[in-house]
Image (tube, helix red, strand yellow):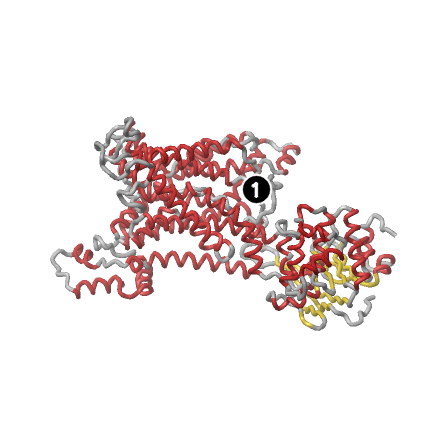
Amino acid sequence: MSRPVESPVLTATGIVRGHQLPRRRPWGPRDVIAALRGVDLQVAPGERVGLVGTSGSGKSTLLRCLLGLESPGRGTVTFAGRPVRPGSTASLRWYRRLVQYVPQDPAGSLDPRATVRELVTVPLRHLQVPGDHAAAVTTALTRVGLDPDLAGRRPGELSGGQAQRVALARALAPEPALLLADEPVSGLDLPVRDQVVEVLADLSARQGLGLVLVSHDLAVVARLCDRTVVLADGLVVEEGPTADLLTRPAHPRTRELLAAVPALPA
Amino acid sequence: MPRRGWVTAASRAVTVLGVVALVGVLPWLSGRSPELSILRARSAEQEATPEALAAIRAELGLDAGPLGLLGHWLSGLARGDLGTSWISGGPVGPGLVEALGVSVTLMGAALLVALGTAALLCWPPLRRGGRGRTGGAVGAALTALPEFLLASVLLLVGAVWLGWFQPYGWTGPSSVVLPALAMGLPAGGLIGRLVADGLTVTATEHWVSTWQVAGASAGQLSRALVRRTLPALTTQVALVLVGLTGGAVAVEQVFAVPGLGRAVLGAAEAQDLPTLQAGMLLLLGVSAVFGGLAALTRALLLGRAMRSGSVPVPARATPSRRRDWLLPAGAAGLLALVAAAGLGRDPFTSAHPRLAAPSAALPFGADASGRDLLARVAHGAVQTVGTATLVVLATLVVGVLVGLAPRASVGPVEVANAAPPVIVGVLVAAALGTSQAGAALAVSLVAWAPIAAYVAAASDEVRRQRHVTVLPVLGVGPATVTWRYVVPAVLPAAARNAVLRLPGIALALAALGFLGLGATSPTPEWGLLLAEGMPYVERAPWAVLAPTGALVAASVLAVSLSGLSRRPRRPAAPAGLPVRAAAPSPEQPAGVG
């Protein structure tokens, strides 16, 4: 079922991660629920991987481990052979330049007091990306299909779709090799969702940008991802080429996910 | 999570030990040499030879440095020895235990008054099922008067004019009434206002309409409203109760009740530090009991929900109305008018007949030294507002800095929040002597805590906003996140919060002045003016009325502004917004104590 990935660039091996629950009684022991129970994941350069699963399947926790924001209880994350683990800002700078992140509700991740130019400059300045930052901002805005004249506006003066693209442009500004996106289109109107999906598809197709897309929306995964990994109860239950997986699901949990989609676009 | 809990617990433990240690080393801090007075107290004949004095110093552990002194004091405590008075030379324990009994009786009576008052204030909103606005006018009026002022007014009306009760002493049940009212009414007003407001807010939550549709009876609904509202308020109610210990000092002083508060105040004035130390320890114990009872109540009401840290605090949904500004604006205008009228006059020269009655030339009359009361009240306003402004600035800086480390600062914030300014004033006066600067220091030592609690809660909220949680991925370090993102977002509201507390701080300064722990004569300070007028209250009521009027105006300002500060400026957040219940509330009442 699982297909070997040639020369993976991002590798997660045997990730185990638990969350502590509050005590039942003040003197009682703390219960621990396992969010991830030994997950392996490989992403090849330029590959587009969909990470799907119901709420509570461990998608977001895995993403936080991949981003070096959380330390896995057991297991390792490496990028091109270098270990990735939470540490000082400086110790992860190399990784953040190569792997960027689009959060859930990207528009909400924009500081309402800053201008678009300031927002997109933030990773350039703090990741100490060399080069002309003003030019890099213009390039990033153009790449996501935004008019560079918008650079002087603030998030409140943008439409929903424009704000989403600014968040994308910010992630793309340091010219990363891989983008991790956590439900980047959930909760968006359909037209806006389609705009953002098209921008992502265009970027990865034309510029070889790798993508790990966390989503419960199988239509988006079908449009964007070559390969899909299904997480359930903290384990990878199925993975394979997206087209195969969606047409011939093997695992019951995958079938449940598919059954929940009203109608897949062709 | 366990590590964070550890930081919080350590912060609490270190703070409590620090306060006890501070009390323990007071004699060293004050740098006084009590051996001669102790020698004289013990025997009139013995020569004050260097050997005899050194023997007493050694016996008291005074030459052993701060740590030796602390050890000496603590080992004495372990043996049940509370210390030796520097004035009488005898043990301080027995007298203080007796005083504790008096104070506990008085606090118990005050508690009954407070609970009765609070119940009366909460009855109307409960009967209406929590609908409609709470008038709050009665509650606000009761809360408005700080204990020392209410005590003076009650003494004037109940004992001097009506003659129903004894003015002074502790001789029977009738001498409990006025002090208990003076302590219990403000506390009850505050608790009642908190609970009534809370009930009104809870009643707007969605589950209430669900219950009504499901056919819940009025009684069931009332019980559910109370049960939902009280847990969020237990911390604040506990603070009000702990504040009774501060109120006890002022009230016992006014009515000459031989309780712990008066003993502590007397010890501070006489520089009898061992008595002060032991009294402080007992007062701390009383506060700890109140705090523990509140925590227990909260745990019983909430159970496991509390430990999951997800109990939503009822979100206040009352919009601010324009006429809410009328009362504070009126009070501020009145004070400004008095200041403008009197600032050109001379507050220090005794140019008038002693205790002259008000007239066209002397609108407020003259005091016992023949000084112009209008001039003294006006200059007092400037003096008080100036000092209070400095205190506000200091508390804002300290509050923001401390609030940025929410977990480590839990202990200091809790202790400073609970410590009544009067008690801290007694400690500062004992260590540094009485002065206006000492009073300002004492008030600053407690007034930063609400700001810090507010900043801690608000910065926690800012740190959870999506545009801040994303920053680490963009390479922004923790220090930059704090200074470039969190502080600018929190500072404006924190500054507004601090400025709205100015009248409350002015009142706390006045309370210290009234008790002789602040400004000294002839400074025209409001609290001191009131204290100076009290002995002449029967012959010349205007000597009391002028400063009382100014203090009442400041109190009205304090309470009405604190009400405004608790309303959100933006459209109300959805009810039941999941704010962490453990987060300290920014809505500490102003002007308690």
Give the residue at x 78% y 65%: A46
Give the residue at x 72% y 58%: A59
Where is A264 relative to A73, above or below? above
Q: Residues within 10 Å of mark 1 (few under 14, many from 20)?
A: many
Residue A218, image x, y percentages: 80, 54
- Classify residue B224 as left or right of residue B40: right
Give the residue at x 80% y 57%: A201
Q: Residue furthest left?
A: B45
Residue B67, image x, y percentages: 33, 64
Q: Quadrant of the C terminus of chain B?
A: top left
Residue closer to the observer: B57 or A147: A147
Residue B216, image x, y percentages: 62, 33
Let me know if residue B326 appears in the view.
Answer: yes
Q: Quadrant of the N terminus of chain B?
A: bottom right
Amino acid tagged 1: Pro
- Classify residue A3 as left or right of residue B16: right
Q: Which residue is mark 1?
A: B314
Residue closer to the observer: A101 or B273: A101
Give the residue at x 83% y 66%: A1
